[in-house]
Image (cartoon, grey):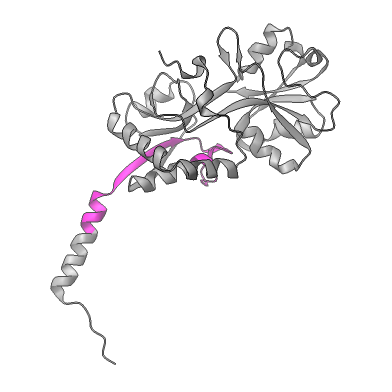
Amino acid sequence: MCLRFPDASLLVAICLCALIEIASARDLRVCSDPDNLPFSNQKQEGFENHLAALVARELNARLEYVWQRMGRGFVREYLNTGKCDLLIGIPRNFKPVMTTTPYYRSSYVFVTRRDHHIQPASLNDPALRHLKIGVQVLDEDYAPPVSALARRGLQNEVVGFESTGEQADGIIRAVADRQVDTAIVWGPLAGYFAQNFGNLLKLRPVKPAVDAPALPFTYAISMGVRKGNFQLRDEIEGVLGRRRSEIWQILDRYDVPQLDLASMSKVETDVE
């Protein structure tokens, strides 16, 4: 049998097409936390890693990560200087950036053992005065629920837990091990780590959804780009619209508690 090979002109054409495709491919640089499951990590195991890969694929772009914790000054030093192009998983009303339409909405939740005799769902439940309440510590400060608890005179009942890195599941494990009676935890983190305990734990959205005058416990979550980068924002809007069902499937795999996007409060949607 005789094998036939393409002639030289065809080989040249193939190589030129390959070079053109490589040259035309764009980079999509995503700023992401290197150790913050269930959201992201350097092994790309978080649901935001999967969302970033989906967006890059839809834009025919090479996905590159800029690994950095999103602390104070982050937008100014990384996004605004062009070190990265995209932030994934930020509140819809995060003013330093230009945000997309939200792609999911979630809530802080009470996490309690199912066999516990008290099952709080409201910050106004009098039973909270007799419970040890786990809360998240974020960048040397407490998460928003602590302000609401303090206004109710419950600051002495609070027990703080780190919520990133190797200790990210500590607050959930503390409920399971009866170190605290309940915990108030951001829903995606709670749902993800509660999976490890089967049916032992119960999650309930915190009420009220907005603690007067303007402290929300539900957040609509978007992606963000530099202010003025309308082209990239609009391209991502297209992806979020076309791949909505795939995005929801990713969130479901990580047990992200999801609320109806259509019922967002004014506090969540107000970007002025």
Q: Residue at x 69, y 12 (%)?
A: 149
Please tell me which residue is depicted at 21% across the width and 55% down the height of the picture. 20
- Image quarter in which the C terminus is found: top left
Q: Position of residue 143 (x, y in %)?
A: 61, 20
Image position of 253 with respect to 180: above or below: below
> Seen from this angle, which residue lies furthest left?
9
Quarter of the image with the N terminus in it: bottom left
- Look at the image and give the residue range highlighted in magenta: 19-48
Up/down of 241 relative to 58, above or below: above
Query: Which image quarter: residue 168?
Result: top right
Residue 53, how many percent across, how many down? 43, 46
Vertical position of residue 136 compared to residue 246: above or below: above
- Asked which quadrant contains residue 270, the reply is top left
Point out the residue furthest to the bottom here: 1
Q: Position of residue 150 (x, y in %)?
A: 69, 9
Q: Does residue 157 appear in this view?
A: yes
224 left or right, relative to 254:
left
Front residue of 31 and 235: 235
* Horizontal and vertical percent position of residue 227: 32, 23
Instruction: Confirm whether the magenta stretch covers residue 25.
Output: yes
